Image (cartoon, rainbow, N blue to C red):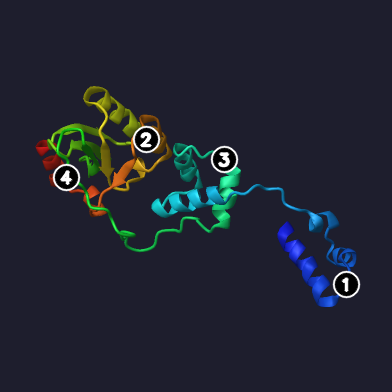
């Protein structure tokens, strides 16, 4: 039983049966110092509003990722305090069930008018003749339609993705915007920290079918040849 629940139980016993606080504590085996304790916590209303706002914008983010987003806004707090507020506000991420559907209203994409205004990131997958799966990480400039990178490997982690993006930026400069799907590689802690260090506005999710990531062999080869 939590301290708050113990205080409520003692108060109920005192009010319902007219007994003293000392007797109620003895009956329920509760320390009187617990009942008389006065919280010394400061006002965290501003922090709570920021946490709830980020959780609403990033519906699949847990408290660890929200902590990174808060640090980007120069809001610093202990991760234990963040977790407590996160749980008290009921912001825990629910398990996905059934078909994935877009949540909320998406903002329309602005057509880029120059190179380096917007890059698109995507993954396509296929299998070798021996059955081993591999993936291709593709980066495309949405204005010039130039393919800036095609990285193929059996494993492409979020850290690997940031290294490849650093190589492109070193050669082409930093883009104004990056759009992608909601793949796990692009919502990892490594990518969030990279966005913070690179001073980007974030990686925006684009409104498209997530099933496009899982292409057949023919579409994978065609994508690589035509990009």
Of residue 36 and residue 83, the one placed in the foreground of this image is: 36
Is residue 82 rendered to the left or right of residue 145? right
Q: State the separation of the CA atoms marked 4 and 2.
A: 22 Å
Is residue 24 rendered to the left or right of residue 54? right
Are there few (<14), some (14-19), or many (20+) residues within 10 Å of tag 3?
few
Spot occupied by residue 26 in the image (x, y as percentages of width and height): 88, 64
Q: Is residue 204 above or below residue 155?
A: below
Residue extending farthest to the bottom is: 17
Spot occupied by residue 218 in the image (x, y as percentages of width and height): 12, 45
The circle on residue 71 is none
Name the residue that disc number 3 marks.
77
Tag in front: 4 or 2: 4
Spot occupied by residue 103 in the image (x, y as percentages of width and height): 34, 59
Q: Quadrant of residue 191?
A: top left
Name the residue that disc number 2 marks.
195
Are there few (<14), some (14-19), or many (20+) residues within 10 Å of tag 2?
some
The tag earlier along the polypeptide, 4 or 2, is 4
Q: Quadrant of residue 184?
A: top left
Q: Secondary structure at mark 4?
A: loop
Q: Is residue 140 above or below residue 43?
A: above
Name the residue that disc number 1 marks.
19
Is residue 128 rendered to the left or right of residue 91? left
The tag earlier along the polypeptide, 3 or 2, is 3
The tag earlier along the polypeptide, 2 or 1, is 1
Q: State the separation of the CA atoms marked 3 and 2.
A: 20 Å
The tag earlier along the polypeptide, 1 or 3, is 1
Name the residue that disc number 4 marks.
111
Tag in front: 3 or 2: 3
Q: In the rendered image, is residue 59 in sight?
A: no
The tag earlier along the polypeptide, 4 or 1, is 1
**Quadrant placement of the N terminus:** bottom right
């Amino acid at each position: 039983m939590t301290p708050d629940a113990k205080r409520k139980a003692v108060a109920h016993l005192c009010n319902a049966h007219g007994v003293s606080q000392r007797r109620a504590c003895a009956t329920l085996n509760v320390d009187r110092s617990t009942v008389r304790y006065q919280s010394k916590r400061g006002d965290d209303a501003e922090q709570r509003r920021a946490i709830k706002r980020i959780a609403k914008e990033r519906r699949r983010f847990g408290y660890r990722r929200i902590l990174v987003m808060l640090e980007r806004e120069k809001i610093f707090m202990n991760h234990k305090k963040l977790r407590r507020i996160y749980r008290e506000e009921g912001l825990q991420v629910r398990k996905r069930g059934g078909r994935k559907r877009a949540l909320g209203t998406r903002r329309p994409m602005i057509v880029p008018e120059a190179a380096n205004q917007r890059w698109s990131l995507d993954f396509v997958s296929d299998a070798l003749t021996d059955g081993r799966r591999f993936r291709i990480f593709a980066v495309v400039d949405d204005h010039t339609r130039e393919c800036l990178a095609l990285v193929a490997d059996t494993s492409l982690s979020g850290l690997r993705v940031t290294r490849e993006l650093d190589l492109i930026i070193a050669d082409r400069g930093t883009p104004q915007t990056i759009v992608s799907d909601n793949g796990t590689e692009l919502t990892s802690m490594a990518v969030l920290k990279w966005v913070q260090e690179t001073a980007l506005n974030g990686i925006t999710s684009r409104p498209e079918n997530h099933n496009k990531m899982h292409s057949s062999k023919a579409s994978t080869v065609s994508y690589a040849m035509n990009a």
